[in-house]
Image: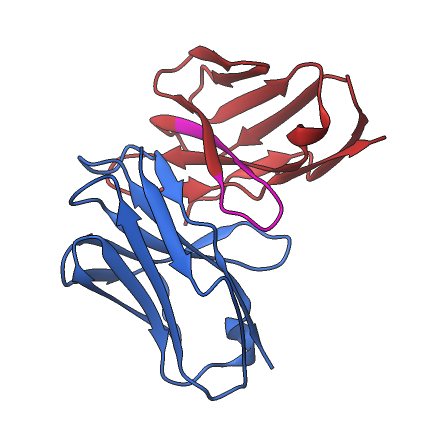
Amino acid sequence: SQTIHQWPATLVQPVGSPLSLECTVEGTSNPNLYWYRQAAGRGLQLLFYSVGIGQISSEVPQNLSASRPQDRQFILSSKKLLLSDSGFYLCASSRAGGDTGELFFGEGSRLTVL
Amino acid sequence: GQQLNQSPQSMFIQEGEDVSMNCTSSSIFNTWLWYKQDPGEGPVLLIALYKAGELTSNGRLTAQFGITRKDSFLNISASIPSDVGIYFCAGLRGNEKLTFGTGTRLTIIP
């Protein structure tokens, strides 16, 4: 099965600073990749998904961007963080072959913006 | 966008009790899935359902794909401490991306 690595696990950043969260996937090739955000005690909000290298779709307008420089690497970035960017960020990968709803999630990156 | 409403929002039960939770939508879905999230970690897939009326088990967990295709149910029998966490339903339809429910937080009272 797949393994999703995310880092850093925890991040405390001041408002206005940049952000880079990284995600790499092992055990599959050409997966669909996703970035989700989870506010405290809430559900999962899809931020970005990617069906291939350089292909990024954004689900909601926001202060964040995503990039996929390699097949199994997905990066979430921001040039200037806002307080509202705080949350638990989860990278996910689908099984090879597209969207069946079956996702493998990373362990998450907890971001606190002060 | 789609909304999946989970009920109850939270549950406090004693070890050994059975648990039931459900997920409803105003729209039809073609696939229903249940995920569990342990504190501070990413969700893990428990059960996937692909057909209306389907009943699938995974150990002490049993999930059903509602006949109307607008709901799904998850039951946990004889709960144990490691069942603690947040349970999310998720639905997939057409070419849309996966929609997650609002979650049911399960707490086991010693």
Image quarter of the C terminus of chain A: bottom right
Assess whether residue A97 is covered by the magenta stretch.
Answer: no
In the rendered image, residue B82, in percent from the top left (x then y), is placed at: 66, 30
In the rendered image, residue B53, in percent from the top left (x then y), is placed at: 43, 11
Looking at the picture, the colour scheme in use is by chain
Magenta-highlighted residues: B32-43
In the rendered image, residue A46, in percent from the top left (x then y), is placed at: 39, 54
For the point 24% across and 60% down, the residue is A57
Assess whether residue B39 is covered by the magenta stretch.
Answer: yes
Chain A, chosen colour in render: blue
Which residue of the protein is positioned furthest toward the bottom in this rendering? A16
Please say if A56 is above or below B83.
Answer: below
In the rendered image, residue B73, in percent from the top left (x then y), is placed at: 56, 22
For the point 77% across and 17% down, the residue is B16
On screen, residue B29 versus residue B59, left or right, reads left
Residue A38 or B3: which is nearer the viewer? A38
Q: Does the image show residue B26?
A: no
Please say if B25 is above or below A32.
Answer: above
Please say if A100 is above or below B59.
Answer: below
Kindly indicate the quadrant of the structure image that contains residue A105. Answer: top left
For the point 60% across and 36% down, the residue is B6
Image quarter of the N terminus of chain A: top left
Which chain is represented by red in the image?
A: B
